[in-house]
Amino acid sequence: MKIIKLVKTKENKYEVLILNIDLTLLCAKETFEDLYTLNFYLQSMQKKFNFDDSLLILHDKFYNTVEILKNNGEIFLE
């Protein structure tokens, strides 16, 4: 299982960290301007590291909300 921490900033940019289950960093922090490139990046990382189970932590700094989602299969954010 991989852990994906996704932070939506107040400027509507997306910051992504991908961690292993033991909280070791798999990829450097990346920043994206839109959901299209973010989804492409997440799907390519999912294929690169060959993981089906993932835990998504979604933090919206504008609304100050946090969602935790368990995902089995392909990752696609809307």
Image (cartoon, grey):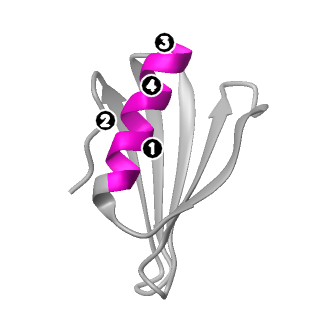
Are the two marked residues, 4 and 3, in contact with CB atoms closer than 8 angstroms?
Answer: yes
Tell me which segment is drawn in magenta.
Answer: 37-50
Residue 34: image location, x then y, percent: 35, 66
| Element type at mark 1 | strand
Which residue is painted at 43% across and 29% down in the image? 44
According to the image, label 3 marks what residue? 50
Predominant secondary structure, magenta span: helix
Q: Nearer the viewer, residue 45 or 67?
A: 45
Are the two marked residues, 1 and 3, in contact with CB atoms closer than 8 angstroms?
Answer: no
Q: CA distance from mark 2 to mark 4?
A: 8 Å
Which label's residue is closer to the chain start, 2 or 4?
A: 4
Amino acid type, mark 2: Ile
Residue 39: image location, x then y, percent: 33, 46
Which label's residue is closer to the chain start, 1 or 3?
A: 3
Q: CA distance from mark 1 to mark 2?
A: 9 Å
Q: Tell me if residue 40 is in the magenta stretch.
A: yes
Q: CA distance from mark 4 to mark 1?
A: 13 Å
Q: Nearer the viewer, residue 29 or 24?
A: 29
According to the image, label 1 marks what residue? 56
Amino acid type, mark 3: Asn
